[in-house]
Image (tube, rainbow, N blue to C red):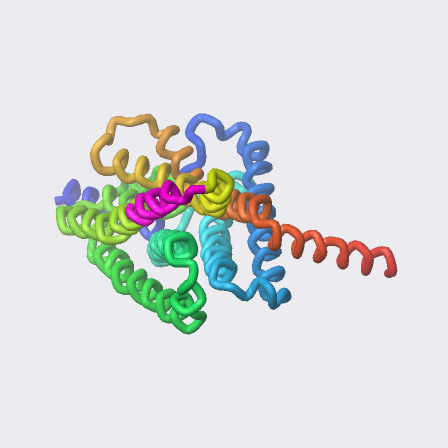
Amino acid sequence: MSAVNETKFNPAVFFLTGIPGKEDVHLWISIPFCLVYVTSIVGNSLILFAIKTDPSLHEPMYILLSMLAVTDLGLSITTIPTILGIYLFNSREISHNACFTQMFFIHFLAKIESAMLLMMAFDRFIAICNPLRYASILTLPRLAKMGSVFVLRGVAIELPFPLLLKRFQYCRANVLSHSYCLHQDIMKLACADITVNNIYGLFVTVITLWLDSMLIFLSYVMILKAVLGIASHIECLRALNTCVSHLCAVLVFYMPGFSLTVIHRFWKSSSPLLQILLGYIYLLGPPLINPVVYSVKSKHLRARIIRVFCQMNSQFIIQ
């Protein structure tokens, strides 16, 4: 009877994991994560400030970019504190409720990120394939409604995950394989049948990430078809150039995300280090890279950010 009780013991906490075998250099590892955190927060905040304070940037493309920046800020704030806690202070313990809460927001914000990329693909599709109706189709009220629908979708499909996990008893092997909480990671520790969690998790992935990515791919097929029909080679390249930033954002988000999903569900014997690195790239890559890519590729946004820096510099000199 005692053996059964030992197996069904429900610990009050989970233990997060850094990079295995590198405990002696955790302090050094924390340095790039601190830089990523600061760069992500500053970069996305600058984009939001530039768009808010410049009326000429109150266009659909930049409104969508501001929504993406808010999502990236949320991902950084939700994820990096527990990562830094491990590498700076060796703080590995996290309570069940805190873990489930972090898990909900990570998965929810990932679905919102996917939705924002889909909306931005739709923006590029309308701008290139139907430019005369661009302003009448992508109005600000319509963008707000689309964003609200995707937020409600994210809440509705992600809320069952913590509820499903709360009903489980967890074994003594309560060590997670990442520096943050993921549904795929937590459910493996349950001393119960996790078939429902597996099926529902796969269902959610298919109707969100996979569906969104398929629609993005379809948008670009139609964009490419329209662009190839343009007689002028210069106009053709100019049209494609407007999609480069979005394509980079799509690749940075979806490639490691799909790889991590496949590894968690179908390639269980893969290297733990590979899973950890892909997890970091999946969650920390977009908030870090998106502001850089869009600032470099968007002439108007870049000019506004430079003006902000010049104003700050002049105020600093005056003081």
Residue 240 is drawn in which quadrant?
A: top left
Residue 232 is one of the magenta-drawn residues: no
Q: Looking at the image, is 316 positioned above or below residue 39?
A: below
Residue 228 is one of the magenta-drawn residues: yes
Q: Looking at the image, is 41 positioned above or below residue 267?
A: below
- Seen from the viewer's position, the closer of residues 27 and 41 is 41
Q: Is residue 57 visible?
A: yes
Q: Residue at x 45, y 52 (%)?
A: 75
Q: Position of residue 164 (x, y in %)?
A: 21, 57
- Seen from the viewer's position, the closer of residues 212 and 191 is 212
Q: Position of residue 86 (x, y in %)?
A: 49, 41
Q: Residue at x 59, y 44 (%)?
A: 296
Residue 111 is drawn in which quadrant?
A: bottom left
Determine the residue located farthest toward the front in the rendered image.
231
Q: Is residue 258 left or right of residue 206?
A: right
Q: Report the number of numbered marks.
A: 0
Q: Looking at the image, is 283 positioned above or below residue 109?
A: above
Report the span colored magenta.
Answer: 218-231
Q: Position of residue 223 (x, y in %)?
A: 36, 47
Q: Quadrant of the N terminus?
A: top left
Q: Is residue 303 left or right of residue 265?
A: right
Q: Position of residue 6 (x, y in %)?
A: 21, 43
Q: Residue at x 58, y 32 (%)?
A: 28
